[in-house]
Every structure is written in structure tokens, then in C-alpha cells.
Image: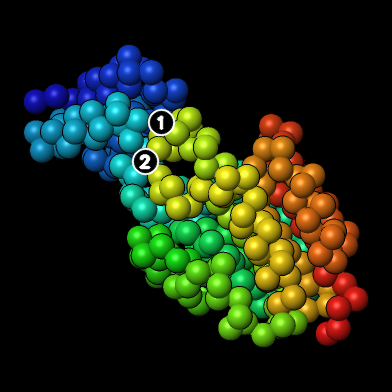
Amino acid sequence: MRLLRDCYRACRDALRAGGIEAPEYEALSLLEHVTGCGRTALAAHGDKPVTEEQQTLLRSLTEKRLTHYPLQYLLGEWSFMGLPLAVGEGVLIPRDDTEVCTRLCLGWLRKKPPARVYDLCAGSGAIGIALERFADADVTAVELSEEAFYFLKKNIEINHCHLSPLPDDVLTCHAACPDGSLDLIVSNPPYIKRGELPSLQKEVQFEPAMALDGGESGYDFYECIIRDWGPKLRNGGALVFELGEKQASRVAALMRVSGFHRVRTALDLGGCERAIIGERVGVGR
């Protein structure tokens, strides 16, 4: 029977040989997922026996990871801003980049009364759940994909949220939302140019194209949301987007032309303009 430390080393070495970027971290993640023993337990109880069933499962997960199948899907859960989120095939994996967009929202919501918020293209619900948890916002999360909507509802349950899930198409369902009724609209929309999808890293190829495909230009959803959802904001309300690389100037121009003021961006850790916010002022209520 193999020991815990031996199973870790075998997994780590296989991942390293397979070109996985962080083999130590990923091996620990898979080991803990299978055995319940993380870094501390490995250090203290490395001589603990691992059952045959656990060894078989660990080997299976390792082999699947070597195909560049996402680690997050293998684990079935991922953390976003300290919140546990269920993930799997059919839903976009929450990323650190999206924290930039979420924190921009939280900064705007600070010192404001509980706000009415729509999270468009909500996916797993990462942004909306964080805004409810950390800003006490009244959030409606709109998601069209049946697969992603399953995870959205599951994550609402996991995090004991009161967030309202809405299975609908953000490109058309704006008509049902009254003008001037929202305080904040946030979206991490599909923003990859369609022609660039085949060149994305191997892990991303397993994620839903529906959550990535921003049309031929990459700006289809930005244009629609600014045009059709902008009027849903009250006077002084804000619109926030996550951005792809080098998209800030064009999205900012689209927002300004549509009557948004105080348009500004926020940087990610790599110095890229990763999120943008603008306020709709002088439009009635």
C-alpha cells in the first residue's frame, strides 16, 4: 500500500513532466480533494497509507489533468474572494481578474444604501454573490446557458444567498426591466474575438464558447448592454464591465457617447486595464 507522501510525489512528478505550470500546488490540490489531506497533513502524516480506491482516483484525475482539462473542473469547486463556488463543464471558471471588476463595484456601492443590481452574463454567480455578501445588494443574476444556470442556482444555495436567478438572454430581456429602476449594472460579458477562440490556451478550450465569444469584433455584448441596458439605470447609477486586454479605450468611448460620465478604469496585477465604470447622470430619476 502506498503512503500519502508517495502519492503526492507521483502526482507532482507526472504533472511536472506533462508541462503543468504549478505541479506542486496542483498535486496538493488533487491529493486533498481525494484524501482530505492537505499540505499540513502531508507534512505531519506523510506516512499515512492511502487506500487502493483513493490511489486509483488520484491517478485518474492526474491523467485527465495531463490533457489540460481544467483543475477547477476536476475539483468541482473554486474560491472567489473567499466564497466557495461550484464549477464544472458548461460554466466559466471564476478568475482573479474578475475580482478587479467586483472590487470596482464594491467601491462604488460603499456608503450607499442597499442597491438594486443586475449582474448580466452571470455565469457561476461569482460577481453577484460577492456583491450581495459584501455590499448587502439586492441582486438579480441573468444567465442564458442552462448548464451555467445550474451552477448559478447551486452557488446561491451553497452561499445561502437571496440573489434572484433569471434564466434569460441579456441581448433581449432588457425590455422587461423598467427604465430608471437600477442602481448598478455589472457584467463580465463574452469579449474574445470569435476568430481568436481556437488560439486560446488548452485549458480554456474546455470552457464554454458561449461565455467567451464576443462576436467578430469582441465588442458585441458591450455595445448591446450599453445601448439597451444603460437606460435602465437611475440618475447617478453606474455601469461596470470586465474588460479584455486593450479594450478599455473603445469601451470607454462607447460609454461616453451613450451619456456616461466619470468613466474610469481599474488595473489588474499585471497593469492591464481590466475593469471600467461609468455613471449615468442627468437622465431623470
Q: Badge 2: few (under 14), some or many (20 or more) residues near its Cα, within 10 Å? A: some
Say left or right for 188 vs 85: right
Query: In this rendering, is residue 14 above or below 91?
Result: above
**The N terminus lies in which quarter of the figure?**
top left
Which corner quadrant of the image does residue 226 belong to? bottom right
Q: CA distance from mark 2 to mark 1?
A: 7 Å
Residue 113 at x, y percent in the picture = 75, 78
- Which quadrant of the figure contains the C terminus? bottom right
Instruction: Write down the residue under mark 1.
Output: 202
Return the x and y of residue 140 as percentages of the image width and height.
56, 74
Q: Residue furthest top?
A: 17
x, y percent for residue 62: 26, 29
Residue 120: which quarter of the image? Answer: bottom right
Residue 110 visible, this angle: no
Which of 42 and 86 lies nearest the eye of the viewer?
86
Circle 1 SS class: loop
Q: Looking at the image, can residue 191 be seen?
A: yes
Residue visible at 77% across and 63% down in the picture: 108
Which amino acid is tagged 2? Phe
x%, y% of residue 91? 41, 53
Q: Is residue 56 above or below residue 160?
A: above
- Horizontal relation, residue 6 to residue 220: left or right: left
Q: Amino acid at mark 1?
A: Lys
- Disc 2, disc 1: CB below 8 Å? yes
Q: Identify the residue shown where x is 61% and y is 57%.
A: 221
Q: Compared to 95, does 111 lie above or below?
A: below
What residue would you read off at disc 2?
A: 206
- Determine the residue positioned at 67% across, 47% down: 243
78 or 121: nearer the viewer: 121
